[in-house]
Amino acid sequence: VSEPRGPLLFKDLDTPGLATLATYRAGGGYETLKRVLVTAKKSAAEVIEIVKASGLRGRGGAGFPAGLKWSFVPKDSPKPRYLVCNADESEPGTFKDRELMEKNPHLLIESMVLAGYAIGAHTGYIYLRGEFEYIQKILDTALAETRAAGLIGKDVAGSGYEFQLWTHLGAGAYICGEETALLSSLEGYRGQPRLKPPFPAVEGLYACPTVVNNVETLMNVPFILREGAQAYRQWGTEKSSGTKIVSVSGPVKKPGNYEIPLGLPLRKLIDDVCGGMRDGMKVKAVIPGGSSVPPLPASLLDTPFDYESMGAAGTMLGSAGCIVIDDQTCMVDALWNLIRFYEHESCGKCTPCREGTYWMNEVLERLEHGKGRPGDLELLESVADNILGKSFCALGDAAAMPVQGFLKHFRPEFEHHVTHGRCMVNRRRAEIAAMSAVVTV
Amino acid sequence: MSLVRVTINGRTVEVPAGTLITDAARVAETHIPVFCSHTKLDPLGACRICVVEVGTPKLGPDRKPVMGADGQPEIAWMPKVQTACTTVVSEGMHVRTETPVATQARQGVMEFLLVNHPLDCPVCDEGGECQLQDLAFAYGLDYSRMADAKRTFESEDLGPIVKKEANRCIVCMRCVRYCSEVMGEDALTAHQRGVWTEISSFNRQPLDCEQCGNCIEVCPVGALTALPYRFKARPWDLRQHITICPYCSNGCSVRLGVRREEILRARGTEFRGVNQEFLCVRGRFGYEFVGSADRLSAPLLKLGESLGPSTFDESVTFVAARLREIVALHGAGAVAFLGGDKLTLEEQYLEQKLARAVIGTPHVDARTRHTAPVAGDAILRATGGGRAALTFDALVGMREVLVLGDDLQGEGPFAQAQLVRGARQKGLHLTVAHPRRVKLARERFNGAHLAYRPGRELALVNALTRAVLDLGDPAGAPPEVTSKLASLKTALAGATAEAAETVTGVRADAIRAAAKRLRDADRKAILFGRAFTEHREAAALVQAIENLGWASGALTSTTASVMYIGPQSNSQGALDMGLVPDRLPGYVPAADATARAVFERAWSAPVPGAGMTAPEVLAAAASGKVRALWIVGDDWLASAPDRALAEQALARAELVIVNEMFPTETAQRAHVVFPITSFAEKEGVVVNCERRLQKSIRALPPRKGTRTDGDVFQAVAQAFGASWAYRTSEDVFREIARLVPGYQGMLTAMMVPHGPQWSLPAPHPAVLTATVADPAPANNGDGLWLLAGATLFLQGSLSHRGALLPRLAGEPRAWLHPDDGRRLGIAAGDAVELTGPGGRLALAAALDDSVPAGSVFVPLGQRGAALNRLGSAPGTGLQVQVRKTAVRETVGA
């Protein structure tokens, strides 16, 4: 076993056999659950207060304070409450939850029992993206073990608290990562977002109070309850406490998942953590938070990686799917690639996102293939502007923001496409030319 | 309800809390465009065309509004535009629709809506009345920035009604939502996602649904259009007339599109009528009979043995002369008038006036399908004695609704839609008492189904009443009711839920639970119709409903939430106008000489007392006691409860006069047939099951050679020497409004399409008596209990005269439970023969587990399935033998 990959979630992640109950327990697993529910008999309100004090924020993308979200569940509702784990990890460039669940399923289970206890839920669901069938098997095996050990079920660890936990596989739609669309899909309906308000904390799954949390968010909970809120704050900044798993992709020497303290400058992440760029390439841009956020040009690489600093730099931390783009990549091609994804994944519920992503994709395809026209860039900006803030959910914004960001920082490359009919820089020029020939035939 | 003040484009209005901005804007006379929003559907917020800027008063640290320099609260504008169709107003809210931000957002959405739209307005049936077209003119650009290839779909026929051109679709989901939330059919769905979202049926099968076409109606663009109307006309070439649908007693407003003298389509009426956009398949596509080539266009007169064309004057003279002879020889009591429940109110009034005041006979009854005599005021009492009646609007908001005995899918499709919407959107709970698992009893509506044994209605209603009374006396009942409850309890002492379980087969705890729900609900209603009134125990049953109404609190001194869904469009009017032998117009007792005197003075003629009901006339005519029959708008051979008796009556009668549109079987046995105009060719008031007076207007000139029933009655009255001089239906209505209790002073009703409901200033006293049901267990011979009822596609004789409705209905079938099918060796599609006490009927068999075991269901009024051929039997039900036959005999056409 090499040295730990990270201080908290990644500390023991590569322990062989961690996915089995025995190994997980050998490392102290389920002890926190027992302490909170049985030995210390902490009240649900106390648990929420500790999580609030830790400053833990949602790791799925929005960064909403987790403890606060839990406290929104009405105390006096006669309806059952639900805890739903959002394991639909679909954001391009993000691949952290899958490794966490693959290697440490029991940590998620323990976390969900604790979170369920805090909000007074007796049923939990883990909503997995359709492609995570193999993870569902891992989780189901772990759940069976846990159930047999009496750690979930009618009477969790003899505490008298009931918590049932089930996995559910989605049918393959990016939109189902949006929490209300996830709930619709979980109920068996078409996966489309719902009106808010009412928010899920008031009317969520089956119109009952529901908390939806990301995998990584939940997995921080046992540490916080074991070591205390202050211990969690040893990492990160005042407003962005704790560690964050960053999924780094692109031509860095060592792409992959890394657990870093929030606030680490991007340059350090690329140069120190990921070993710098490979093959002598230079960074042109970084999309720091998954495909939905605007890119940062190389000039802003010193921006610290935390919620506030990223916001100030005109982008977002998002899901921390950090896509590094090198200087030989055509930004028109890169943007087309992104927009093609959004056009394909727009759920179709609202007009701006449905039609706008299609339109932008058409224009970008044309542009990339040398068929750009004067005015195309203004058209793209205008279409993006007509989507931004007018769509039903954040998917439309997520498609519009990269367009605005790419045009803001890399406009000359787009203009070059319009005026010259080809890329300013492109490692894949030959490849694209071949595709272009096919298209024109 | 508390009011909030909201300022829209500078104009402040007060609206109830909970109002959406789109609705508040209407009050403020500001137009906010919508596509996906619809008054009957839950807000969706998908199309985004309604985006506006919204601000609320800025709150200081003390949670009080911060005041600006002008003394007005400062407004905190939301950073993003908001959808007006999903945002609820709050106190002090400001809304702006014309700012650069709002305008640009709206224009952006409009442009997006046209990105993939084919702009094929010139070949689109919706063109000219398309909301997308209208709003593109109002809010769109006059050029397109979209220069790339559009996404395209294939067009698709979703069955015989719905044509889909998905390229035109703007994915507002109105069709899918309406189909689910209002119709409860869930026949439509969205395939794929994103820009590839396509509305279709499941697995692209022909739509398996009520074929109501409301998806077409609510489609704001030309994505769904009606196949029967495809490419027939442009809307601006049509004259559009809003009149009242002739099919059932719900009284939906229907907008007929007429070109030259032909009806090309029927549509709903946005914002008007009880139904607004809603129509059922009959209302939307059942107008074909008006233009039928089979319509009679000249009076027919029997000279010698054959019926031949005649003139109107000759026929009138003949009728008057023959009636005079019969009255002179046998007395006026030898004449009977049957039918009239499809006429206008004015014609109904004239029918009974002709019978009573001119000819002098007391025998006049519109209820030709009745199998047993029922008092003319029984339904009035069961529905609250004339207290302000239940509305369809109120029905949606009920907590508990008990539907007794009828399948509303056939008897009142709009009532059914209101109940579906209540159940789907507003927490309405349904209790459906019906032997079959009818639509409203399906699991998807989360109601309770009391599946009683056919013929055992009385035991069930009595047990419900007894169970309700066991829970204590009702609140809000007038003293005259409370004083009678004790004797009712005594009378129902034996009607326990357990006793009813033995007789009806409905579990005792289900009866008690239904009774408790009905009693406990703060808003509740009871609906009943022909299944009870045409029952052999109708008199006791209608009385039992009155008992239940008072006992459960559905009837109180101020509210009357029991609704009678009559079998025909103006069944209610027929009762109101005295087309019953024991009641004069306004439910004045005919037997009461003092009460009668008012009419005698008004009509300047003696008025006879009470006469015979329709079933009594049937028997009397068959035995030769009634010698002249005037059958009004009714194919009596098909509708009389016993066909053999009716045949006998027609054969024996010296004079048979028929008012008809078509050469029906009955008309062919007549001595005189008057050719009658259709509903679309005449005007007058009809009264729906809400007791609402609605003006039916003339959309077409009368078919050549036809007369209205009113004209016929007047001509005969004049030939009889009466000084009738009504020039228009309004002249008649003025007389009604002067004379008839409940209708007095309702002169506006003759002018407006959606008039008021009538009520009696002094309601009739309640009667609370109980007839104890036959406690004997059902006779389990080897026969099957016959179940009959109207179904969706065919109701009455009119629906047969077109092509579409009979095609949708398919061939008539006898429906059996699969277990009975197995027991009798009958498979679906087999030829079977039903044998009753009076005759036989050959049909094809169908198997369905919605029919209870031990029963056979035959849809009412289908051609070739004349149930009255089976005869009638005394007692509580009719048992028939069903057997498989080798080859199906030819059934009557």
Image: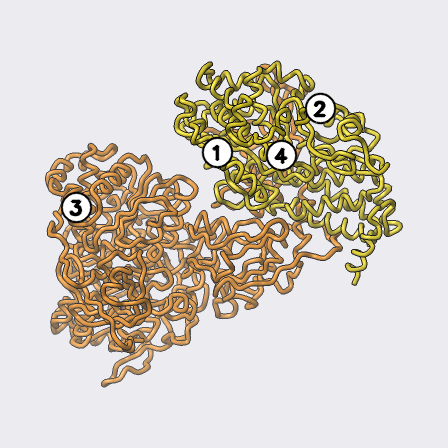
Chain colours: A yellow, B orange
The residue carrying mark 2 is A308
Q: Residues within 10 Å of mark 3 (few under 14, many from 20)?
A: many
Sequence-first disc among 4 and 2: 4
Disc 2 on helix, strand or loop?
helix
Depth check: B26 or B201 in front?
A: B201
Q: Position of residue A164 (x, y in %)?
A: 44, 32
What label sits on residue A99 in the rendered view?
A: 4
Q: Quadrant of residue A240?
A: top right
Question: Going by the image, does A127 lie left or right of B69?
Answer: left
Q: Chain of mark 2?
A: A
Image coordinates of residue B402 in percent, x first then y, are: 29, 45
Amino acid on which disc 4 is placed: Glu
The quarter of the rendered structure image containing the N terminus of chain B is top left
Q: Chain of mark 4?
A: A
Image disc number at residue B500: 3
Q: The residue under label 2 is which amino acid type? A: Glu
Residue mark closest to the camera, 4 vs 2: 4
Q: Which residue is mark 1?
A: A143
Q: Residue at x 32, y 68 (%)?
A: B812
For label 4, count other residues whose C-alpha is less than 10 Å away and answer few (under 14), some (14-19) or many (20+).
some
Q: Both on one chain, marks 3 and 4?
A: no
Spatial CA distance of label 1 from label 4 is 17 Å
Q: Secondary structure at mark 3?
A: helix
Residue positioned 20% across, 68% down in the render: B870
Q: Quadrant of the C terminus of chain B?
A: bottom left
Say left or right for B142 vs B820: right
- Which is more foreground, mark 1 or mark 3? 1
The Cα atoms of the two marked residues, 1 and 2, are separated by: 37 Å
Residue B14 seen in this snapshot: no
Where disc 4 sits, the SS reads: helix
